Amino acid sequence: MSGETGSLRYMAPEVADNLPYNHKSDVYSFGIILWEMTSYKKPYEGFSREAFYRRVVKGNERPVISKKWPKELGKLMGQCWDQDVSKRPNFDEILRKL
């Protein structure tokens, strides 16, 4: 699959960069939603399209994981956001961890 599909703030970097993508892009989006539910904040609030591309897609910036959250939950979020798509867990792994 390829092409820009979805809301930018939840979009995996490879999708925003118009590169081929697969189900691991959904894992990235899930990790962002998990962060949003835990933080009660919108990810990348106030980022323009250009800032998102520069800071998230090319700069690998991710939301801050609070030290107050369970360590394993923060670790899972980080794994879901990995810039290396092949290192992201699949949903079976995520279910086992949750």
Image (tube, grey):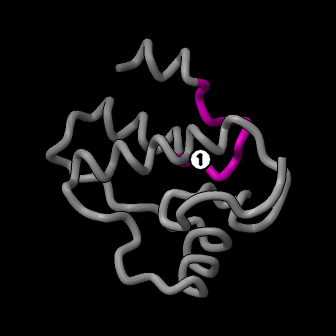
Pointer 1 residue:
82
Q: Quadrant of residue 28?
A: top right
Which of the image's four quarters has the C terminus?
top left
Q: For the stretch drawn in magenta, what is the main secondary structure?
A: loop
**Residue 69 position within the rendered picture, expressed as x and y whole percent measured from the top left:** 19, 41
Seen from this angle, which residue lies furthest left?
Answer: 68
Q: Quadrant of residue 34?
A: top left
As for residue 87 lying within the magenta part, the answer is yes
Position of residue 46 relative to residue 66, above or below, is below
Q: Amino acid at mark 1?
A: Asp
Stretch of the chain drawn in magenta: 81-90
**Residue 59 position within the rendered picture, expressed as x and y whole percent measured from the top left:** 61, 73
Residue drawn at x 30%, y 52% is: 36
At label 1, counting other C-alpha atoms closer than 10 Å, the crowd grade (few under 14, some 14-19, many 20 or more) is many
As for residue 50 lying within the magenta part, the answer is no
Q: Secondary structure at mark 1?
A: loop
* 40 left or right, relative to 21: left
Residue drawn at x 50%, y 86% is: 48
